[in-house]
Amino acid sequence: MAGGLFALLDDVAALARIAAAGVDDVGAAAARASAKAAGVVVDDTAVTPQYLQGSAAARELPIIKKIAIGSLRNKLLFILPAAVLLGQFLPELLPVILIFGGAFLAYEGAHKVHEKLFHHTTEAEEEVSPEGEFTPEHEARTIAQAVRTDFILSAEIMVIALKEVVGSDPDATIWMRALILAVVAVLITVLVYGVVALIVKMDDVGLHLAEKPSRGSQRLGLALVTAMPRLLAAISFIGTLAMLWVGGHIFLVSLYEIGGHDGLLEGTGIGDVLHAPYDLLHHWEEDVHHAVGGALGSLLGWLLNTVVSGLVGLVVGAIVLAVLRAFGVGGGHGDEHGKHHAEQHAAGHVAGDADGGSPESSEGHAGGPPGEAAEDSPNR
């Protein structure tokens, strides 16, 4: 009896070791897959804060929580099953899907550039309460819009992660892929919306420190509040660059894979044409690397690839933007108006008339600089 019990315990221990090894594999694979999607994660983090523009300070964290739950639902209930089935049975279609995702990101970046250059906005003023805050109806619409926009970015993140999983371990079971993607979904959602929460509450921390008796705390608090407009402007700038760079890179690489080895159009004339642009860019990158040599050569080669990808993203995004506008589609934020409120708040004023800049279409989230919502809260 004792021998049988010990044998059973040995079996349980062996199963536990196997499970632990499997967890380690899942964790490592999820980390690699998440790293591949880092560019889109930066975009998602930079875009999200703008949905809080005009909301009351007390409503910011609840709104972020609702958007985060919606984002996780998008990833786990809708995108994950579709992505896993696609990766299992039609993996050759993954680059095709990423082409549309790359074009969408490029469009968002080009839309931001257009808004910045021409200060053009097509959005109507949003409904606010007498205190200058968003009404509950508008808040509900804003959350729904943020979740819809998040669906596009989440789909890109999950497809990029799946592509990495399929490429690194083609023999992985469908259940292993699903588990890895689930870990990626939770990890990315917590990371993105945790950072967003920190960003939008940073000026609250500054105001709290400024009210303390310590002179050092007061100086630090005032520095945080004063720095917020610059930080938000930097986030907007970085987010725009990330959209153009990542969108252009995804677009070029996906075309390359469609026309390359095991691609849908491998060996055809069209496939050769699609394969050529990124192949040429890759050769340029290698030429710079070999000509300069060492770490500096690698850095300059990467910068060349990044700049060209960003320019491609700008061109592709501009074309998409022009086509959509020709059909009367598109719109954006009045980002200069939102920036004015942010600067007022940073100077210690209370914003009496909240800026109505929440988008009403998925295209609109590229219209105004992300992150400026934190300064718009009239209750601060």
Image (tube, rainbow, N blue to C red):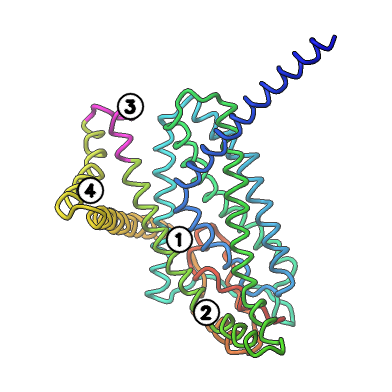
**Above/below status of 111 relative to 260:** below
- Residue located 58% across and 80% down the image: 224
- Residue located 32% across and 36% down the image: 257
- Which residue position is annotated with label 2? 229
**Above/below status of 88 relative to 180:** above
Residue 281 is marked as: 4
- Callout 2, which amino acid? Pro
Q: What is the magenta range? A: 255-268
- Which residue position is annotated with label 1? 328
Where disc 4 sits, the SS reads: helix
Distance of mark 4 from mark 3, alpha carbons?
A: 21 Å
- Residue located 69% across and 63% down the image: 63
**Is residue 265 located in the magenta-colored stretch of the structure?**
yes
- Callout 4, which amino acid? Leu
Where disc 3 sits, the SS reads: loop
Residue 261, quarter of the rendered image? top left
Task: Name the mark nearer the viewer: 1 or 4.
Answer: 4
Furthest residue toward left:
291
Residue 54, quarter of the rendered image? bottom right
Q: Nearer the viewer, residue 124 or 7?
A: 7
Look at the image and tell me in which quarter the N terminus lies: top right
- Which residue position is annotated with label 3? 262
